[in-house]
């Protein structure tokens, strides 16, 4: 399976960064602008089984995807599976303490392209996916550090310190 990955060091404690990604309510806010209509569809907002659905809009049309947390170990990793009816892929979030910051690595493992044209376009698609993932990491950083508007916010269902 091909992999697209991005990393970013965030000036916030690992528990805060993990909680922001683990909460589906806050996680939906980090999606790129072409991911619209995100909504929680599970009773639980965090942890295994937490699910949200969204519409992905591209130049070739729009389609709905559902993301489910399939594994997690606070505060080290979260694994999400996203399914759009045709394709299923996994995104793995890894968190590591780095001095007084958190190193976040996001990897998306997706199916190998089918057909010659898709194979030839593979490197372009991987770069576009990595750019989209970096948007999520930047928005995560802005949310937990308050860089965007000067106020950091905790996810609504963040654990008590």
Image (cartoon, grey):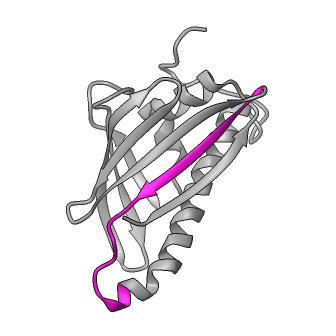
The answer to whether residue 33 of the structure is visible from this angle is no
Question: Where 60 falls versus 42 (above or below)?
Answer: below
Which one is nearer the viewer's eye here, 3 or 55?
3
Q: Quadrant of residue 14?
A: top right
Which one is nearer the viewer's eye here, 123 or 153?
123
Q: Position of residue 80 (x, y in %)?
A: 37, 43
Question: Where 75 falls versus 119 (above or below)?
Answer: above
Residue at the image position 28 percent from the left and 80 percent from the top: 114
Question: Where 3 falls versus 13 (above or below)?
Answer: below
Q: Position of residue 35 (x, y in %)?
A: 44, 57
Q: Quadrant of the N terminus?
A: bottom left
The answer to whether residue 90 of the structure is visible from this angle is yes
Please indicate whether residue 124 sits to the left or right of residue 1 in the image.
right
Residue at the image position 30 percent from the left and 65 percent from the top: 63
Q: Quadrant of the C terminus?
A: top right
**Farthest residue toward the front?**
1
Residue at the image position 32 percent from the left and 47 percent from the top: 81
Q: Is residue 106 magenta?
A: yes
Q: Which residues are magenta?
A: 100-118
Please indicate whether residue 161 sits to the left or right of residue 73 in the image.
right
Q: Position of residue 136 (x, y in %)?
A: 57, 50
């Amino acid at each position: 399976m091909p992999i697209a990955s991005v990393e970013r060091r965030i000036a916030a404690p690992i528990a805060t960064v993990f909680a922001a990604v683990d909460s589906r309510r806050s996680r939906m806010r980090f999606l790129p602008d072409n991911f619209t209509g995100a909504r929680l569809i599970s009773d639980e907002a965090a942890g295994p089984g937490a699910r949200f659905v969204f519409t992905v809009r591209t130049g070739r049309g729009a389609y709905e995807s559902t993301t489910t947390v399939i594994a997690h170990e606070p505060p080290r990793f979260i694994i999400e599976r996203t399914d759009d009816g045709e394709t299923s892929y996994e995104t793995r979030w890894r968190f590591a303490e780095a001095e007084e910051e958190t190193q976040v690595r996001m990897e998306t493992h997706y199916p190998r392209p089918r057909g010659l044209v898709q194979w030839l376009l593979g490197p372009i698609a991987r770069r576009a996916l990595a750019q989209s993932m970096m948007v999520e990491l930047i928005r995560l950083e802005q949310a937990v550090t308050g860089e965007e508007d000067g106020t950091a916010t905790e996810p609504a269902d963040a654990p008590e310190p």
